[in-house]
Image (spheres, rainbow, N blue to C red):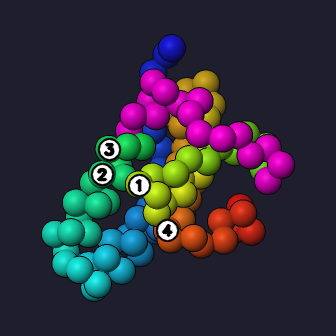
Amino acid sequence: MKPRGIIFAPEARADLLALYEWISAKASPEVAMAYIGRIERYCSGFDLASQRGHSRDDIRTGLRVIGFERRVTIAFMVSDQAVTILRLFYGGQNWEDDL
């Protein structure tokens, strides 16, 4: 296995910010930051184990999805050099239509 870089698409960064703001308002900034940190650490593990999750070529060629802590769906694509995190969907959002 060769390591790949991890790239968060602008839409994925916006998803993380929106999730932070929502959790921060419902719980606290500390809880929100800890949760976002766990998501980012999880995604950083895709550098070596990038073929995880489920292939969803039926939605978009090369698309893979994986769950995180039973609440977040992470949509990503893998190339020879990088894993691009496309979007992060929280709490049952209709991610299939968005992709």
Looking at numbered disc 3 in the image, what kind of residue is underneath it? Arg
Q: Position of residue 99 (x, y in %)?
A: 71, 61
Looking at numbered disc 4 in the image, what kind of residue is underneath it? Tyr
Magenta range is 44-59
Q: Position of residue 70 (x, y in %)?
A: 46, 58
Image depth: mark 4 or mark 1 in front: 1
Q: Is residue 4 visible?
A: no
| Whether residue 18 is situated above or below residue 82 in the rendered picture | below
Q: Quadrant of residue 11?
A: bottom right
**Residue underneath mark 1:** 69
**Labels 4 and 2: the sequence-earlier one:** 2
Q: Residues within 10 Å of mark 2 (few under 14, many from 20)?
A: some
**Residue underneath mark 4:** 90
Q: Residues within 10 Å of mark 1 (few under 14, many from 20)?
A: few
Image depth: mark 3 or mark 4 in front: 4
CA separation in Å, label 4 and label 1: 10 Å
Check if mark 3's residue and mark 4's residue have beta carbons within 8 Å: no
Looking at numbered disc 2 in the image, what kind of residue is underneath it? Arg
**Labels 4 and 1: the sequence-earlier one:** 1
Q: Is residue 49 left or right of residue 53?
A: left
Q: Position of residue 75 (x, y in %)?
A: 59, 52
Name which residue lies at 46% across and 63% down: 71
Q: Is residue 27 left or right of residue 76?
A: left
Please state which of residues 63 and 26 is positioned toward the viewer in this rendering: 26
Name which residue lies at 71% across and 40% down: 55
CA separation in Å, label 4 and label 2: 14 Å
Q: Quadrant of residue 89?
A: bottom right
Check if mark 1's residue and mark 3's residue have beta carbons within 8 Å: no
- Element type at marker 1? loop
**Labels 3 and 4: the sequence-earlier one:** 3
| Whether residue 24 is situated above or below residue 61 in the rendered picture | below
Q: Is residue 25 visible?
A: yes
